[in-house]
Image (cartoon, coloured by chain):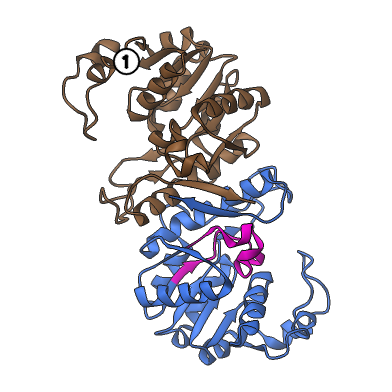
Chain colours: A brown, B blue
Amino acid sequence: MKIAVLGTGAGGRAHAAKLLSLGHEVYVGTRDSQVTLGRTEPDFMGVEPFGQWLADYPGIELRSFGEAAAAADFVINGIDGASAVRVLEGIGRHLAGKTLMDYAVPYVYNPEQAHPWPTPWGVMPALDPVDHDSLGERIQRALPAAKVVKACVTQEQETVVDPRGVAGGDHTMFIAGDDADAKAEVTELLRSYGWQDVLDLGPLVSARGMEMYAHMHSAIQFALGGGRFGVKVMR
Amino acid sequence: MKIAVLGTGAGGRAHAAKLLSLGHEVYVGTRDSQVTLGRTEPDFMGVEPFGQWLADYPGIELRSFGEAAAAADFVINGIDGASAVRVLEGIGRHLAGKTLMDYAVPYVYNPEQAHPWPTPWGVMPALDPVDHDSLGERIQRALPAAKVVKACVTQEQETVVDPRGVAGGDHTMFIAGDDADAKAEVTELLRSYGWQDVLDLGPLVSARGMEMYAHMHSAIQFALGGGRFGVKVMR
């Protein structure tokens, strides 16, 4: 498949590398390729410059968001929650009719809105939207011709692309969306990543619960002292 | 132990019956015992009148909220989220120094605030507070001398008191609170219920994630078509 991964952060890189290893044609989208490739210092999270990372993955092509989406049949949104709707709206014509897998958590990093929650990084970002709406639904409303599927939101990217690295893969991946064919495509992709238990949570409105689970996921991670884990629905 | 269960709903009844079977002295608290015992019709959820239920559990004593709390060493809050803070504040002097296990989800059943989420009951209640605060923390702030432990919030009551009924008990119970001794007491109680994996999520601020998980829990339940399930942290 021709797959676009929008965003050059750790999540986007994990998907792009995995997709390349699975034999897909991979296009990574960014705001401005020259700016992205021109960076030579790690970002504020300590992530290595994208150009340096890309050198290890010949075959992955870096393009503008619109060009990457236009080149692909299947699109993965890895643009941060605060910018995603605006950016995706701007390239909407390249997303029409395509499956758009969205894994973003709508964190708000504004220190004034952050919670004084004792985390390894001092505060806990707030969620916006929360409870009455979700980022997944906002993206779908902004792009009525795209087929949005929320997935991978409840997992670290390392585990998303390597589920067998935790408990031999014996844990659950959740998806939600309003288009059955798009969910079937996403499920197939996730199975190719190694996910054995993909649980369809129904319509995209369930993205609310998936995004709001972010705080629980963080709390579990802090409780375990870091490290990788999965959550399995036992029934 | 002398244990008070505040609230006469399905959750309170499940705890009270289990605690009685474990040999504890059980006091169920209600607003007005005479009114509670005077009901002869099922409530709007179809739950049988409390007096009828109580007849099957000789030994459980029905008292006012304050009297039940005063008689007990350990208190379980089963008062609905909308009323809990107000009611508990009113009987605060009987809760000082005691462990208060709170399992309430702060659902708002006001139809104007409910979400048009396709659920078996048509809408999904909203959460208030959400994200920036939690019911557990509100109760703790209202009762600084009580030791609030959030627990059991992510499970149906039937499974809370009978964890072995799902996957042989091989799933996780989450707790959070600011007092280590109180959490140890709650953990011991949960182990006596049959919980094998009790995961301490740290300070009471983690009640936010636990309460916000409610929508995810509902979505999983709808996806499975009802029935009992548990969630296990695989690590």
Q: Measured along the vertical axis of the image, is residue A192 above or below residue A160?
A: above
Q: Residues within 10 Å of mark 1 (few under 14, many from 20)?
A: some
Residue A164 position in % (x across, y down): 46, 37
B161 in the magenta segment: yes
What residue do we see at 53% from left, 28% from top? A190
x, y percentage for residue A2?
49, 11
Task: Farthest residue to the front: give it.
Answer: A168
**In this image, A29 relative to B28: left or right?**
left
For residue B87, say whether it is visible: no
Q: What residue range appears in magenta?
A: B149-174
Provide residue A152's location: percent of width, then percent of height: 48, 35
- Per the image, the residue denoted by label 1 is A57
**With respect to residue B221, does B59 lie above or below?**
below
Left or right placement of residue A34 versus residue A90 in this view: left
Residue at 58%, 73% in the rendered image: B193
In magenta stretch: residue B15: no
Q: In front here: B10 or A82? A: B10
**Relative to B137, does residue A77 appear above or below in the rendering?**
above
**Residue B66 horizontal side relative to residue B48, left or right:** left
Residue lying farthest to the left in this orientation: A41
Q: Chain of mark 1?
A: A
Q: For the point 47% across and 7% down, which residue is it?
A: A71
Camera-side residue of A80 and A151: A151
Please provide percent x and percent y for residue B6. Answer: 59, 79
Q: Amino acid at mark 1?
A: Tyr
Secondary structure of the residue carrying numbered label 1: loop
Q: Nearer the viewer, residue B188 or A105?
A: B188
Residue B69 against residue B128 in the figure, above or below: below
